[in-house]
Amino acid sequence: MFEEKGILFILSGPSGVGKGTVRQRLFEQETHLKYSVSATTRSKRPGERDGIDYFFKTKQEFEEMIKEKKLLEHAKYVNNYYGTPKDYVLEQLELGNDVFLEIEVKGALQVKENFPEGVFIFLFPPSLDELKNRIVSRGTESNELVVNRLKEAKKEIDMMSEYDYVVVNDDVDVAVSKVKAIIKSEHCKRERIEKQYKKILEDDTNVRTIN
């Protein structure tokens, strides 16, 4: 029987490029995808569920996970740790589920170092002017912060060569269609199919030998 493992897809790109919007629209259309649940040391908020919204950990537990290399990536924001548990991702992949991770560029490069077999998708803005407009339209950043975000975006765009695919987010629906096409394409790659096919042939050879 042909049993295909799941694939880890990482969607990344500069702040303000629309990663969250693309991921949300994608999940509305591709219900088989599993969203990667992060671990955090911050306090649980009303309505949040452990293992669903986050894996809530103490600081000691989280630092132990870092020490034992049980995280694909991690970072610290406002005195709280956030990270992607490796065991959860591997468990879902073994079950045949595709796992989708939406993350900043620095985190994506950590994931690549720890799990290079993932599929890395860089979400690219139509232009830096458009990226600036999107950041400004939020109305939450000062002029200084906008300038800093754009400087960081230029550095992150230079890291595009670390990714497998690039999708321009000019139109959300078009961008989502391209990501869906990437997912289908990856499942048809010869090297993925070949491993399973060889196993089937080995099993068939064993059966013939017994007969």
Image: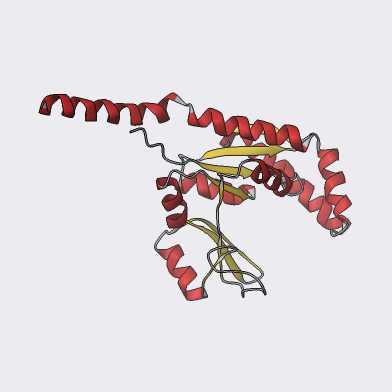
* Most foreground residue, 168 or 67: 168
Which quadrant would residue 120 be assigned to in this image?
A: top right
Q: Residue at x 58, y 36 (%)?
A: 163
Percent position (x, y) of residue 161?
60, 33
Q: How is the image coloured?
A: secondary structure
Percent position (x, y) of residue 147?
83, 51
Residue 109 higher or lower than 54, as above or below: above
Left or right: residue 154 compared with residue 108: right
Q: Residue at x 81, y 57 (%)?
A: 145
Q: Is residue 164 visible?
A: no
* Most foreground residue, 9 or 66: 9
Which quadrant would residue 195 be assigned to in this image?
A: top left
Q: Quadrant of the C terminus?
A: top left
Percent position (x, y) of residue 63?
47, 69
Percent position (x, y) of residue 26?
66, 42
Q: Quadrant of the N terminus?
A: top left
Q: Residue at x 77, y 48 (%)?
A: 16
